[in-house]
Image (tube, rainbow, N blue to C red):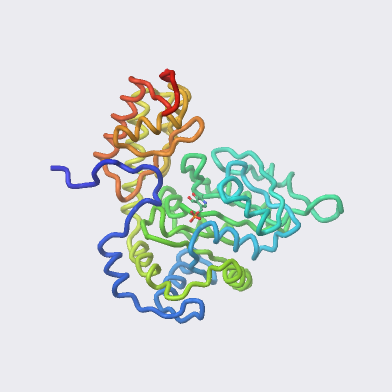
Amino acid sequence: MHSGPRPPYDFRSDTVTLPTPAMMAAIAGAALGDAARGDDPTVNALERLAARLVGKDDAVFVPSGTMANLAALLAHEVRGGEVIVEATAHLYNSEGGGLSVVAGAVPRPLPGRRGALDPDDVRTAIRGGADLALAPTRLVCVENTHNAAGGAVLPLSSLAALHRVCRDAGIPVHMDGARLFNAAAFLDVPLAEICGHVESVWFALCKGLGGPVGAILAGDAAFMQRARRAVKMLGGGMRQAGLIAAPALVALAEPWPGLRRDHALARRLADGLAAIDPSLVDAAGVQTNIVNCFVDRVTGDATAVAGALAERGVLANGKRNRIRFVTHAQVDEAAVEAAVAAVADVMRCGARRPDAVEVIR
Ligand SMILES: Cc1ncc(COP(=O)(O)O)c(C=O)c1O
């Protein structure tokens, strides 16, 4: 009998995973202290390990990725200047405008290719301070893997080329590495090799890694001094945070087999969807744990399709033209098969918006 996850199978995000028994045991046994005073040994151990993994001088444990991005923007002192971002980046589209509201910067969105900024476009877009009418470029932000681009991994060569352009212009590069470990698993390189091409980076502990809460922001010593001040200002100074750092340490102990399994499940899901209709997915382009299913090419409204999938025991994010499926530790092959069967059924029967009169097809 199947002993894995049970319906509803939840593909909405890799943030939905619950702590494992080993994580719960680590929470119960965690050594604690006042983290905001630097007294929590578990947080300190997590920060030391994280800094070593990404090859930076220092790292700080923060409650969320959004706070990591904000602290990085503040530490890079972007106020009054422009921040170049890829046009579909999470930082620009999905963080409540904090880039402008909190960090005081003007976003300069540039179109990317599968989430990757073109180094030549960035060279052209960078503004120096000579023209008093222009807000000077202060920072370039990249996202790796790229969420909206279906978990696409930034090629190392393009990242290196972008870094050269920015270094020549004296502009730092910040990486939103919410799913940095997925990128490293796909590229099969150490995290530090990717992070050598950016001045600052953060990664999530509560997405593909499966920890319950938090993110790590890392950079060189001078940047981190400013970043730690920014975290404190943003309200990220935590107290006995060893309670959430302890399961993160468990998550970091052996992340690679689980991430590779998630990627294999995503490919399997993409192949299954392509077998229903090849126009639904770019199956060959699925590199990590995100599969974008472009239902508009076959049946119309993604919100209606997501609702119809939910009725069939499969949860996924439906937005505009696509359904996003994310694989993670708490879905398995049976869940993937159920998702493919549910999509096939919805394609066959059509999907109805709760308030719609006509069946979409
Ligand atoms: C690429 C990316 N950046 C940033 C975030 C924000 O992270 P958090 O939800 O921890 O604030 C997310 C969240 O899903 C994300 O996918």
Classify 177 as above or below 226.
Answer: above
Residue at left offset 48%, top offset 72%: 238
Picture mark count:
0
Residue 61, x across and y down, in percent: 48, 68
Q: Quadrant of the C terminus?
A: top left
Residue at left offset 27%, top offset 44%: 332
* Left or right: residue 293 compared with residue 313: right
Residue 32, x across and y down, in percent: 38, 78
Q: Nearer the viewer, residue 313 or 266?
A: 313
Q: Nearer the viewer, residue 356 or 193?
A: 356
Task: Indicate the quadrant where residue 305 lies.
Answer: top left
Classify 201 as above or below 326.
Answer: below
Task: Indicate the quadrant where residue 251 lies.
Answer: bottom left
* Left or right: residue 143 compared with residue 82: left
Task: Indicate the quadrant where residue 19 lies.
Answer: bottom left
Q: Quadrant of the N terminus?
A: top left
Residue at left offset 61%, top offset 70%: 233
- Residue furthest left in the image: 1
Residue 228, x across and y down, in percent: 58, 71
Residue 234, x across and y down, in percent: 59, 66
Classify 33 as above or below 305.
Answer: below
Classify 63 as above or below 105.
Answer: below
* Left or right: residue 323 compared with residue 235: left
